[in-house]
Image: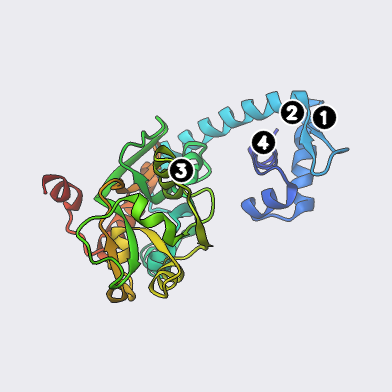
Amino acid sequence: MKISDIDAFAAVVRCQTLSQAATELGMTQPAITRRVQNLEEALGVTLLDRNTKPPRPTDIGRQVFEQCRAILREVDALRELTAGQRPPAGEFRVGLTQGLGELMLPGLIARLAGQWPALTTQVTTAWGGTLVERIARRELDAALVFLAREMVLPPQVEGERLLATRLVAVGRKGDWPRRGYRLADCHARGWVLNPDGCGFRAGLRRALDAQGLPMPVTLDIYGRDLQLQSVANGFGIGLMPLPLLDGSPLRDALDIVPLTDFKPQIDLWLLHRQDAARFAAPLAAVAAHARTAFALPADAAAHDEAA
């Protein structure tokens, strides 16, 4: 019984399809199929029901999957125990919350590759809550995310808060001259938002529901600059972390809508697995890159708290 066979079976169950598991592990589908068969032969049981498409774990397969996850956690812990004595190498799986990719991605990959040629950085973008869950499940090593101030991290996830900031409503320049507005004054303009799954969108919906207000969405789109350009063109009100707004080339065409009844506090976090000691240096480089991208001092979070 080989660890590689255990890893392959766990990936198939976790990803739910052979093709996605093969992509995650950098293998062909026939190769990953053979590894699963090797494990079935070693255990003498059928782990996947191949009469379903895609194959699903059998009853015993689900039990074996949980045991495989425990084994892989122990293997990772063993590797971490000795890896801290060597320069960073191998896969470094990093997540970026939506909106950060276009701002940071090219420079971040170049920086990590330049400092650690033996390190292979794999980057994925997703909603912040999804990235937290993937770190907890050991599917990612680290993530740079905006999270609501009140969010509690799972015990398997640790991190450093880089910046305390806020989520702001954004409107076309000149459309919002008053010193204060309420959601009831604004919702009729429509909203330019991330698609469903975004935690910030969900928070806005809860605030509107609490006041019995609808949430008309004029545009469901990804991408910071595409959203802000749509807002600048008068298609509705946007919702954006303040640092992403301030760093946009469209900033001068926009105004912050001063809402008095919706002022979410958020934080920029660099999160990582508890046992990520071998990535200490790359994690420090990610934090430094984020501080440079947002022009933050080394003690930005503490300074913002004091203010």
Q: Nearer the viewer, mark 3 or mark 4?
A: 3
Cα–Cα gap, marks 2 and 4: 12 Å
> Which secondary structure lies at badge 2?
helix
Q: Residues within 10 Å of mark 1 (few under 14, many from 20)?
A: some
Q: Residue 129, labelled with which disc?
A: 3
Q: Can you identify the residue that label 2 sits on? A: 61
Cα–Cα gap, marks 3 and 4: 28 Å
Kindly identify the amino acid type of the residue bearing the numbered disc 4.
Answer: Ile
Task: Tell me, yes or no, if residue 84 can be seen here.
Answer: no
Cα–Cα gap, marks 4 and 1: 14 Å
> Which secondary structure lies at badge 3?
helix
- Taking the image as shown, residue 292 lies to the left or right of residue 240, namely left
Give coordinates of residue 50: x percent, y percent. 85, 38
Please report contact status of discs 2 and 4: CB closer than 8 Å, yes or no.
no
Q: Can you identify the residue that label 1 sits on? A: 46
Kindly identify the amino acid type of the residue bearing the numbered disc 3.
Answer: Gly
Q: Nearer the viewer, mark 3 or mark 2?
A: 3
> Which secondary structure lies at badge 4?
helix
- Taking the image as shown, residue 170 lies to the left or right of residue 67, namely left
Give coordinates of residue 170: x percent, y percent. 34, 63
Residue 41 falls in image quadrant: top right
Kindly identify the amino acid type of the residue bearing the numbered disc 1.
Answer: Thr
Residue 108 falls in image quadrant: bottom left
Q: Residue 236, labelled with which disc?
A: none
- Which residue shows up at 42% across the image and 70% down it? 225
Please report contact status of discs 3 and 2: CB closer than 8 Å, yes or no.
no
Give coordinates of residue 245: x percent, y percent. 31, 65
Disc with the residue nearer the chain's start (4 vs 1) = 4
Disc with the residue nearer the chain's start (3 vs 4) = 4
- The outermost residue toward the right is 51
Give the quadrant of the N terminus.
top right
